[in-house]
Amino acid sequence: MGTGGGEDAAAFFRWVHGLATDGDRRMVPLGDLAPAFDEGVGSLAGSVKRSVWHMTFRPTWSEVRMARPIAEVSRRRGIDARYVADRLAASRLPLLSSHHFPYFRNHPVVAPLLVVDTRAVFVGAPPGHQLAGEVWTSTAPQVVDGAIRVFDAVWRAATDPHPDGVPRFTRRMVDVAFLLTDGASDREIARSMGVSERTVSHEVGEIIRRLGARNRAHAIALIGDAGP
């Protein structure tokens, strides 16, 4: 593939997955996605200088939690942050788009892709693919240029899930949700966040209401996509 994929996402991913399968030195294997990302997310977040573009096939709540350091970097002034996931991902994880507001958009995603500072690329494969669960990185100009073109095309075609400019949940509600799904009590959440227990109780009640949950346990299940 001479151009590295152009704006055709499917063609780009076929090309890079082919390189990975063939052991091409432009694609450096990092092993299984979860441990590789878990171990390297801190240093990766610390390396971001200008931009972080993340396209994810369909994340789990644990993956969203794992990527929080990158989300924090994305909120820094001067960082060009972009996050794309499909509509089903946003509906399965109700707090997903609010977590990445205002740089979240919806669009069908072929495979996971992360582009850092338009110089380093991280690529995964979707479920069902023979390479599913594995991740590679590349700084080869042909791969990086192809990834940039593909991501830019997807971003321009993607839709904003918050057309009125208002996320469904506030940032503090998202922070509370992470601690809720860790099993923390209101007192523990209040201590961790440096707010009053009454404030936390209010936020938990509002999360339950906005999710349409029956109670606290049901809300926790819905946040992590474990409930009906």
Image (cartoon, helix red, strand yellow):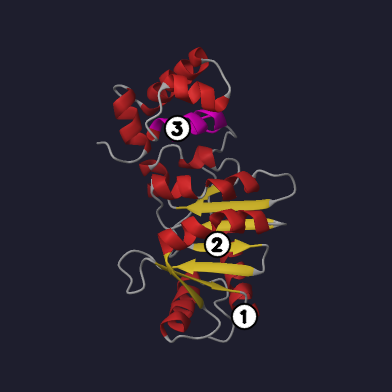
Please tell me how crowded label 3 is: few (under 14), some (14-19), or many (20+) other residues with Cα within 10 Å. Answer: some
Which residue bears the numbered disc 3? 179
In the image, residue 35 lies at what x, y percent?
43, 60
Q: Distance between the residues labelled 3 and 1?
A: 42 Å
The percent coordinates of residue 82 (x first, y second) are 60, 53
For the view shown, which residue lies furthest in the left direction?
A: 228
Q: Distance between the residues labelled 2 and 3?
A: 26 Å
- Residue at coordinates 58% horizontally, 70% vertically from top-left? 147
Q: Nearer the viewer, mark 2 or mark 3?
A: 3
Residue extent of the magenta highlight: 167-180
- For label 2, the residue is 114
User: Amino acid under label 1?
Assistant: Gln
**Furthest-top residue in this view:** 198
- From the viewer's side, name the closer residue of 21 and 189: 189
C-beta proximity under 8 Å, tags 3 and 1: no
Residue positioned 47% across, 16% down in the render: 202
Q: In which quarter of the image is residue 2?
A: bottom right
Three-letter residue code for mark 3: Leu
Callout 3 secondary element:
helix
Q: In this view, does 111 lie to the left or right of 2?
A: left
Residue nearest the observer in this picture, 35 or 21: 35
Whichever of labels 3 and 1 marks the residue nearer the N terminus, that label is 1
Residue sitting at the far right = 78
Q: Which residue is drawn at 59% across and 82% down?
A: 3
Q: Does the magenta stretch include residue 224?
A: no
**Residue 62 location in percent, x, y?**
40, 47
Q: Which mark is residue 224?
A: none
Amino acid of disc 2: Leu
| Label 1 sits on residue | 142
For the residues bearing labels 1 and 2, Cβ distance under 8 angstroms:
no
How far apart marks 1 and 2 lie (CA) works out to 16 Å
